[in-house]
Amino acid sequence: MHKNIGKLKRTAEEYAVLTVASLIMVVGIYAFKFPNNFSFGGVSGIAIVLSAVVPASPGSINFIINMALLVFGYLFLGKEFGTRTVYVSVLMSAGLKAAELWFPMEHALTEQPVLELIYAIVLPAFSSAILFNIGASGGGTDIIAMILKKHTVLNIGTALFVVDLIIVISSCMVFDAQTGLFSLCGLLAKSLVVDNVIESINRCKYFTIICSEPEPICDFITHELKRSATVYHAEGAYEHSPKTVIITIMKRSQAVELRNFIRKNQPTAFIAITNSSEIIGKGFRGFN
């Protein structure tokens, strides 16, 4: 019973995160990419370019392409096609179409294209980083990547980059050189922002604590912070006095609490704190 409740709670929290990330993506695309014709890759980039040559809005084209890709995903991937990808793809497509109907935009929010480019990069990239971090994707060209990975031996990263580059080049021809150059900057910056956001989300603090009285520190770690630690005995090189070394890893907010506790209760303890961008193990990534 408790396991089922816990599972339902985790699922609800997961889909709440998916929903928020999808809405952030919708805002970034609709409010900043669409009005400025920033077409740096993905289905939204294709939709922006096509909307300039066919009588349909970017939101409508985005919806049609995403729904078609979902069908292809089911046909070529079957059970491997995740429900989270379907949920995010449908929510984003419907959100963009709803935004066009409820909040029509005839021009950009500001007269500062560089400022708008920053938001057009950061918001979708931040959203993508959240989705990637919990094992989901935004659909669209990610579905193509999944199909290529299963059925071909192509270098997927290179293939998708080439597709994105073709979209950017198309924007130069359909719109103007300035729009194309802005789109190229967006394409180059997008992956960097995604990588940095993921690293920031996953960043943990690695503690190496050398002390003489380990019990209070270990009790605080296990009972107050609900973490664990590894303890082993050592000897000081200068005075040859017995020491205890405590190694523990935790999130940044907990790290502040532990550091303050040690400084207050054992000011003579030696603490080395380093950053770690990825931890795999129980209580972190890779384990439930």
Image (cartoon, rainbow, N blue to C red):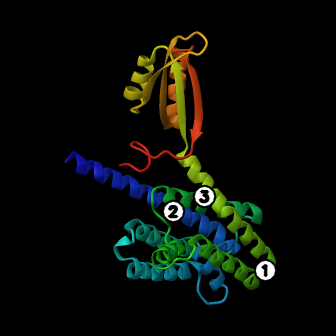
Task: Name the secondary structure under disc 2.
Answer: helix
Q: Real-space Cα distance between discs 2 and 1?
A: 30 Å
Q: Nearer the viewer, residue 235 or 26?
A: 235
Residue located beneath label 3 in the image: 194
Residue 61: in sight, yes or no? yes
Q: Nearer the viewer, mark 1 or mark 3?
A: 3
Q: Earlier in the sequence, mark 2 or mark 1?
A: 2
Q: Which mark is residue 23?
A: 2
State the image coordinates of residue 165 (x, y, percent, origin top left): 68, 76
Q: Position of residue 22 (x, y in %)?
A: 50, 63
Relative image position of residue 248 (x, y in whole percent): 47, 32
The image position of residue 224, as x and y in percent, is 40, 27
Residue lying at 57% horizontally and 13% vertically, measured from the top left: 268
Q: What distance separates the C-alpha of mark 1 from that of mark 3?
A: 27 Å
Closer to the N terminus: mark 1 or mark 3?
1
For marks 2 and 3, the one nearer the N-term is 2
Residue reaching furthest to the left:
1
Please determine whether, in this image, residue 119 is positioned above or below residue 229.
below
Q: Taking 205 as reference, is 220 above or below it?
A: above
Asked if labels 3 and 1 touch by Cβ distance under 8 angstroms, the answer is no
In the image, farthest residue toward the bottom = 54
Residue identifier under label 1: 176
Name the amino acid type tagged 3. Answer: Val
SS for tag 1? loop
Q: Quadrant of residue 156?
A: bottom right
Say above or below: 201 vs 168.
above
Residue type, label 1: Asp
